[in-house]
Amino acid sequence: MEEPRKLYMVVPCYNEEEVLPETSRRLKEKYQSLIQRGLISGESRVVFVNDGSKDNTWQLICKLHESDPDFFSGIDLAHNAGHQNAVLAGLMTVKDLCDMAITMDADLQDDINTIDAMVEKYYEGNQVVYGVRSARDTDTFFKRFTAEGFYKFMKTMGADVVYNHADFRLMSSRVLQELAEFREVNLFLRGMVPLIGFKSCCVYYERAERFAGESKYPLKKMLAFAINGITSFSTKPLKLITGLGCLMSALSVVALAWAFIAKIGGFSEPGWSSTMCSIWLVGGLQLLCLGIIGEYIGKIYSEVKARPRYIIAEFKNKEK
Ligand code: UDP
Ligand code: MG
């Protein structure tokens, strides 16, 4: 068999002190078995990215690194950059150090035992392996409803995403090099990775409940994430506006004709109510359209500034 390859895990952590000890223990166990079976190289590692946590997450990561410097590395971001940016910070840091990288949440919702299948798929020649949730039994009804609606809505809005795949995926270093060329600031990784292309496949797993602690993705963040995903990947809303504009124009011609006929026929009423209605309707539509256009202008604004997407304060990593 060919030489086993180096696998790096990238794990974003925001206030995860409750789950980190268990996550690191389980990952270590998994790696040991993978190394023993000759699936990955002994130089493989786990890299925790501390995303500006307010609790003791970074202290815990430092302890893990000190106790096992050949296995645990840590990246400390200077401030809370958000999940997507934290993942990217980790990936860009490890892209030249590993042969493949897997991104996974810290809360053990993604099944660690799926890693075996992911790595096997990598050796079969896949450059990207998507972890796809086969069931959502452990999610609350609300989470399931909103999340599945999100994937369907993204599809109809023209963004190419893998259904029920979040950010649990394996990428080869080749793909990471290409990902580095994507300069956008409004990150939506699950839309960007399919754009890169290469041979890819899916592995299926059942999503567990969060091991401990609370979700760091409240409804507000989830909504912001969905809106970002659509406006970063699709111009369909703009086209819808155009369609709406055409429809309104057509309707107004009909209305005009009717008003004219009514006038000539002499059966027009003082049209106070219809005037009020149209003012409200047209005003509302205009505001809606302006809002959507504003979304895109906001995007242009932040892309043009081209600010760094994350800032690494410290990288604890022992050279081998
Ligand atoms: N996370 C992060 N920065 C944030 C919010 C979340 O790095 O600002 C991390 C978090 O620590 C976890 C992952 O992103 O590892 C997913 O968050 P969570 O499990 O809370 O989201 P959910 O599974 O509820 O959607
Ligand atoms: Mg979670």
Image (cartoon, rainbow, N blue to C red):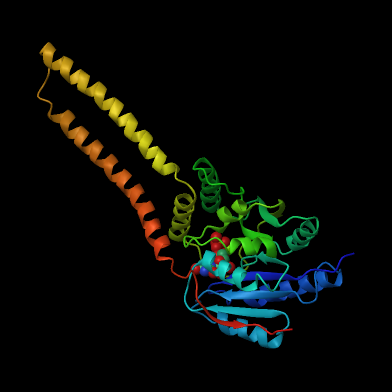
- Residue depicted at 79% across the width and 68% down the height: 5
The answer to whether residue 215 shows anywhere in this view is no
Q: Is residue 219 left or right of residue 99?
A: left
Image quadrant of ligand 2?
Answer: bottom right
**Picture layout, residue 298 above or below residue 305:** above
User: In which quadrant will I find the C terminus?
Assistant: bottom right
Q: Is residue 162 left or right of residue 1?
A: left
Residue extending furthest bottom?
A: 66
- Residue depicted at 47% across the width and 76% down the height: 79
Q: Position of residue 73 (x, y in %)?
A: 65, 80
**Picture layout, residue 30 above or below residue 287:** below
The residue lying toward the viewer, choosing from 115 and 201, is 201
Q: Position of residue 165 (x, y in %)?
A: 62, 53
Which of the 4 image quadrants contains residue 139? bottom right
Q: Position of residue 1 (x, y in %)?
A: 90, 64
The answer to whether residue 229 shows anywhere in this view is yes
